[in-house]
Every structure is written in C-alpha cells, then in structure tokens.
Amino acid sequence: MRRFDTILGPLVVLALLIGFAFVGDNYFLRLATFMLMYAVLALSWNFIGGMAGYPSFATAAFFGLGAYCGAILQKAGVPMFLSWAAAGLFTGVFAMLLGRAILHLKGHYFAIASLIVAEALREVVNTWTELTGGGMGLNLPVLQMDVTDQARFFFFAMLVVAASTFVLSAVVIRGKLGFGLSCIKQNEDAANILGVDATRYKVFAFVLSAVFVGPAGAIYAGWVNYIEPADAFDVLLSVKPIVMVILGGAGTLYGPVVGAFAFLILEEVVWRNVLTFHSGLLGLLIVLLVLFMPQGLIRVTARRLFRRTAAP
Amino acid sequence: MLYLQILVNGLLLGGLYACIASGFSLVWGVLNVINILHGSFIVIGSYVGLLAHQQFGINPFLTVPVAGLLLYGFGYLLQRGVINRAVGQPVLVTLTLTFGLELLVNNMLIAGFTADYKKVVLENPFGQIELGALFVPVDRLLSMVLALLLTGILYWMLRGSKLGRAIVAVRMDREAAALMGVKVNSIYAVTFGLGALMAGAAGSMMSMIYPISPIISTAYLGKAFVICVMGGLGSVPGAIVGGLALGVIESFGSLFFSAELATTFSFVLLILLLIFRPTGLMGRRGYE
Amino acid sequence: MEDYRVEHRMGLKTRRIVQAALICAVASVGMSAGAVAADKTLKFGAPLPLTGPLSPEGLKQKEGYDLWAEQVNKAGGIKVGGDSYKIEVVYADYQSNTPRAVQLAEKLITADKVNFLFSPFGSGATKAASAVSEKYGIPTIAATASSKAVYDQGYKYLFGTFTPNSTLTTPLTKLVKEKLPAVKRVAILARNDLFPLAIANVMDGSAKGSGLEVVAFEKYAIGTLDHASTLTKLRATKPDWVFATGYTNDLILIREQMRNAGLKVPVVTMIAGPAYKEYAESLGKQAENVTSAAWWHPAVRYSGEDVFGSTEKYNALFEAKYNKVPDYVQASASASGVILQLAIQKAGSVDPKKVRDALAALDAKTFYGPVKFGSDGQITSLDPPVFQIQGGKPVVILPADIKQADLKPVS
C-alpha cells in the first residue's frame, strides 16, 4: 500500500499524462499545461507555506521574475532550455537574498513584505522600458513548429518541471528538512532550542518555493509568446496557489496536486459559463472554502467515505 | 517657491491618505485582520456621495455621515456574519478570506454600477486660493481638514470613551479583556464597523476629487498598506503621520525623479522599513 | 494542520451540506463540454476584457458587436449563395489579462469552432492574439488596434479598422500651428502604458516635425492617484500646449488638477478621454475647449452599402438600443462586423481563405467611412476626425469637409 502511495501512484498518473498528450486536442492540452503550471505553483508554495507555516505571498514575484528572465535572455539569443534553467537559478538566488532579508519577520509583517515584493518588482519592470518593454510588454520569438507539436512541447516542458517539483516535495517531506520545517511551524523557538537551525531551514524552504516557479514562469512566457508586467506579476498568482493548497490539504504531498487539479476545473467551469461574474464566484468559492472546508479536499472526502463504510 | 508648492501638494494629498488608511489600520491592529475589502468600502462610500449628488444635488461633504453610517452597518454585519468565524486564525486564513470577499464585493459593484468612471461635478466648484504663485485648491484643503478631523475624532474616541477603552483593551490582550467582562465579539464587530465607517466617509469625500469606479479600489488598498506599515500597524496617529509622510515623499519623488517612479519608490521604501524598522516611523510597537 | 481549522461555530449539518456542495462542484467536470452547433449559423469569436481595468472598453466593444449582430439577424442574416446564416457572437472574458486573451482566442477557435474572430482590446493584446488566428487561418478583424507594430508582422489574416497613430496627431498639430501661431512650447504627459505611451511618442514626433519645441515629456505610472506635483513641474516649463494621454479616469483627474495647479495654457489636448461622454460629464466646465482626436466620431456623415446604411441611421439605432451616443470604440466594433459581413457576401462563401481574400480586396462604403485595407492589413481609407469639446459636447473641427466649428483656444 505504501509503495503504491509513493511510487506506483505517481507513475500511473505520469503515464496517463504522457498518453494524454497524444490524444488530447489543443484546447485540452492547453488546459493540462495550465494545470501542471498550477501544480508547480501550489507544490512550491507548500514548501514555505504548508510545511514551514510562513504565509508567503511571493509566488507572483518569483513567477514574474522567471518569466522576464527567460524572455529577456531568449530575446538576446540564449537558447530556450538554457534560458529556462537560468530563470530557475536567478529566482533561486533572488529568493535566497530576499529570504535572508525578510524571513526574520513573522505573521502579517512577513505576509506583507512578500506581497509588496511582487508589487515593487512589477513597478520596476514597468519603468525599465529599455530592458523589459515596460507597459508595452515583450514579444517572444515564435517557435517554427506545427501548432499541435508546439502545444505538446510546452505541455512536456511543464510536465518535467511539475514532476521535478513533486519528487523534491516527496523527498523533503519525508526527510530531515521536512521534519525541521514542521517543527518550525509548530513552535519556532522550541525548534531552535532543539537544535534546528531555523533560519537556514526557512531560507532553504523559501528558495525551494522559488526555484521551480522561475522556470514555470519562463516556460509560460515562451508558451504564450507575450508577457506584460500586470500579468506576470499578477497578485492572483500569489493567492491562487494558496487557495489550491488549502483546497487540497496543506502540508501534505498530494494536497497541492489535487488542489491544483480541482481548482483548474472549477475555474474553467465557472469561466466558461458565467461571463461577467466569474471573479465574484471565485471569491465566493474562496470564502466558502476557508469557512467550511479549511482542512482540504483530500481529508474531507476520505473522512466522508470512511464514515459511510463504517456506519452500518 | 516651487518646493513650497510641492510641499503643500504633498500635505494635501497626505491628508487624504491618512483618511484612507486610518480605518484599515484600526481593523488590522484590533482584529489582527488585514481587510482587503477596505478599498471597495471606500468605493461604496464614493457611490453614496455620487448618488446623493445626482438624485438630490447634495454636496458630497454633507453625505459623509450618511456614507459613514451605512458602511458602519455593512461592516458590522459582515464581521458578525462572516469574518468573525475566522478571527484568531492565522494570517493566511484571514487574508485569504477577505481577499475572497473582495473579489465577490468588487464584482457585485461592477455588476451594479458598471466599471465606467463617474465623478461628482459641482455646480459651483470650490476653486482655489492663490497666494502669489502658490495654489491651494479649496476642495482638497477642506477634504484634508475633514480627513484629519475624522481621524482625530476616531483617535479621541479610542482614548476617551468607554467603548474606545474596551477596543484598546481587546487590542492589547483579548483574553484579559474578556475576563474583565468585555464582550470581545461585539467589540470586534464594532471595530470592523468603525473601520468601514472611516472608509465610507473618506469615499464620500473623495467622490468629488477622484473619478469613481469599482476598479480603483486596489489603488486605495495599496496606499493603505504602505501608509499603515509606515505609521506602525494599528496605530491611528501612525496613520496620520504615515499618510502625510507618504504624500510628501511621493510629491518630492515626482519632482526629483519622475512621476512614474513615485510608486516604485514608495514600495521600495516600504520593504526597507519592514526589514529594518517594522514598528513604523513612529517607533511604536506594532501588534506582533 | 490544526491551524486551518475554523472553530465549530456553525452547526455540523450546515457544514456537511456545504462540504457536499463543494465536492459536487468539484466533481461536475464534464458538464460544460460541447458547443451546440446549430446549422446555418456563423460564429464570430470575441475575446474581450469584460472584467478588470479594461472592462469599460471591453463592454463598449461588446455593445458594438451586439448591435451589429442584432441588426443582421433582424434582416434575415447573412446571405451567401442560396443560404442565409444567422449570426452568433461568442464572447469570452479575458479579465484584462493579455495572455488570457491569447488563450481564449485559441479556445474560441478550437473548442467553440468559431468561423471568424474579432481581436481583443488594444494594440498589445491584438498583436499577441493575432499569432493564434494566423496559425489557424481564421480571418480576424481588429477593432481597436492602431500601432504599426501590430500590422508589420507579415500576417495574412489580420485586418484593422484604425489608421496609424500619427494620423491623429499630425493633422491636429498642423491645425494648431495654422490657427494659433503663438503656440510654440509643448509639454507631454503620458501614461506609461501601451497605447497612451505610443500616441505620446508619435505626438513628440509630430510636434518636433512641425517646428514646435517639446519642453517636457513626463510619464506617470498606471494607477497614479495624484498629478499635482508633476503638473507643478510642467508649469515651471511654461508650456503653451499640454498634451496628456491616458484613459478616461486619468485624464479627468489631470484636467481637474491642472486647474488646481494653476496650469493655464491656450491648447489642451487629451487622448483618449474626450471622445467618451463620461469625460465631459465628469468635468463639466473644465472640459470646455479640450481638443482630442479619434478614428471616428458620431458627427461624421457617411452613407454605406452595409446593414446600417448611414452614420445617421447607425447613431439612431445605437441610441434606441443603448440610450446613449456611440463613441469610436463602439462604432469600430460594429464596423468590424460590417466589414466581415461585406467580405463574406463578396466572397460568396464562408470559407476562411476566400473571405480573407475578399477582405484584402475590399473597397466598400460603410457608415463608419470608406473601407480599404493596405497590404499590411491596416485600413488606409479613413480620415480620422479632430474634435473639441464646445458647449459640453464634442464637435468636429477637422477634416475641413465635415467640420462643425473652428478651433478655439482654452483660455
């Protein structure tokens, strides 16, 4: 059972996804790519938010930074894969420096500092017109590739990032780092006394919450061919992963993935059927979720199923 | 002379900023809730001013109490019915909750009023005072005075009245206040209502200064954030100092650098403040 | 995990009901699939910013398309050979988020199977989405894109109803030089955003090109709440002409604060606010004698072979439906529909390739003006009107053959 949980299960999902890439049409491929992107964001946020309990709103900052890093490098002629890797490295280093600066803050202060970083970066990108195109946005080189192949290409690129994030999550959650982070979450002072180097652990978790988001941003930029500051640093990019993780179950391995999947479906269903009131409905969903199902989808369904079978 | 004019501009703007932020700061300090809805509350206040002016020709200054009371009721009920369920939860929960509410309320405003910009146009504009080369627009001056007055009343009320002392007591130590017989839940609701009241009053006043649209709420919220951190969380005098400081900083920022950098500048300042002096300019200890 | 648990203040029953509802909502996946394909219907996809900061513009475009579709359907649809097709405009909201617009364009083409596409709002999003319609070979009309950069990509399926930006600023500059020769110094204040910045740059060129001095070029950030200090700074440069760009809210605020800052100049030009009725309504007397330019104006007079017949009739139909005067965004949107309709009828087919060729060869008269596209797909036949707010209403001052009044100085 445990083996199925940790190895077989994900492998089956992976195989299904790969198979899907060859049968799904462009529209569904696009949705699936989005789902993988959401999964990357949610799994990444889970390192710092779910495991360490730090309310980070920096995901949008990492995403935008990665998107612009990838886009600018590609425009300068750097090969695509290299630019993606560079985006990861760059956001990682950025997260390390930022983490050292703001991780001593707690609660609201940390939340706001991380939130404002994205706002500040957006303004910088907006005004640095020579490098970033400012409000005019950046157009990326178009791939000379068949439409469907292109959709598949970006799907697989996102799949690789998502799978890496997942594997790393699994390793961390079962390892010393994961244990240390959960100590920090429960009581940081006590963790320090027990010999957990809280600062190092937190910075490490913060960097982990950035290194995959950067490449995801860079891939996204290449995929949509056009980025602009308002979109790449959208505050919703910070909020959605949190909602997904809460939806799925925070601090768990599968929670973020399930949450990302469920969230994407909800978003798509609402978006397709309600023309001008979808952000209101999204808001309503968030409110209901926070009030009525704060422990996440996985646990609630599991408990309900269990109760059903145990009752008679 | 130019510098004097810029300083005056900054102070006039700062007065409005103080009014935008004081309610936000109060709620944050007492309930430990970051009220993302604050910007939309201001917008609702603006629509009260606009509708009253369109329907009955009332000057928006006169609808300030109406908008304030209306928003007080709305805030009170919202806190009682929804937000109170999450008070005391980690910041993640409360922040996500008010964010969801903001999406909902703002979308309802757009559905009700459309996103088109509107504005109160006075038959007889207040004009401006010209002192040599110095220009002081009267509507802004009045707004600043009223804004500071309202914030002052709020401060006085917190210090002087029984209710105010109960609010401060809850802010300092919820458990102890409860033991002393303070009804914490109703204090929370009243405080949230007061925060909304300040937003509504500010909004009504600003309906003749700023174009009104639900879309503008995020701009107000962003300012409230910066001011609140600058002044120190939860501190009403801090909101005044932070508001005036931000107004002056932005004004000189657009003179010396460029208007497009003024916002960047204030955000960077905010991050630096958070890192090096999280208690705000006033040096008061914040809530956490 | 305990931190996420909200205390049990509500009854267990409500809780479980809501939980069940949420799970159901998550589970109801496949419900929304499948666009219903009724025969003899032509589908026009329109990704629009119906929510978010650009929603005022997006909703205007929607009004334009809706009016056109309603009129065509009332007249029995589009007749192609022996068939007549009803029209359905399929809308999708991209929430003022450009990449979403691209994604939705693809969704409309692949999932909703639209026959033709209307571009999203503005040059940036149009350019971004044009790559998609080009990929799939779907004829696309851009109702609100003016920048040359949109059309010089070598695309075959994109056609636009706005002439280049410089066609707005150059005639205006000429007129000012001619009527008010004392005007020498221009101060430009631009919103740092795609279209406002582009038009400011073009104005910079037009002014310098005709021997005026540009004494200041200031940019302000999106969402700026106060212009007092920037305007004080501009006042110090002693301009005769203030040229401000932005959207309605920015320009209302700037105009108001110009008065507050004591910045009085003979010529005030604002783009794109004064073309909208909200501008004059929100400013009252302050709007008086502000000049602007746009690609279309309800005061122009054209007769056409399209479903509307003439500008007057278009205005009347628009007012009857929406109880307001159309502006250039709404008219351009209606014109986009009209143009596609004419091309389909001329092609005698709904085949995308044939319609595309008919668009490239189109030379028609419409209520919007004569329509003829250049080899890059941008319209060449339009003479954009320059206008001024006089007596609370915009009146045309250029081109000379349709002008209703002469240019007046502000003060």
Image (cartoon, coloured by chain):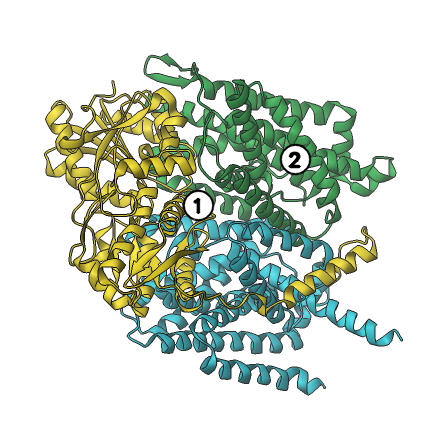
Chain colours: A cyan, B green, C yellow
Residue for point 60% across, 68% down: C29
* Label 2, residues with CA under 10 Å away: few <14, some 14-19, many ≥20: many
What residue do we see at 67% from left, 70% from top? A252
> What x and y, as percent, mark residue C91?
44, 55
Amino acid type at mark 2: Leu
Labels 2, 1: front one: 1
Above or below, comparing residue A9 to residue A302 in the picture: below
Q: Amino acid at mark 1?
A: Ser
Q: Chain of mark 1?
A: C
Quarter-of-image position of residue C39: bottom left
- Report helix, strand or loop for mark 1: helix
Q: Residues within 10 Å of mark 1 (few under 14, many from 20)?
A: many
* Residue for badge 1: C55
Residue linked to disc 2: B26
Measuring from the top left, give residue A64's x and y in whole percent.
43, 59
- The circle on residue C154 is none
Provide residue B245's location: percent of width, then percent of height: 49, 32
Where residue B12 sits: x, y (%)? Answer: 46, 24
Which one is nearer the viewer's eye here, C75 or A50? Answer: C75
Of residues A143 and B166, the one drawn nearer to the viewer in this rendering: A143
Vertical position of residue B226 compared to residue B73: above or below? below
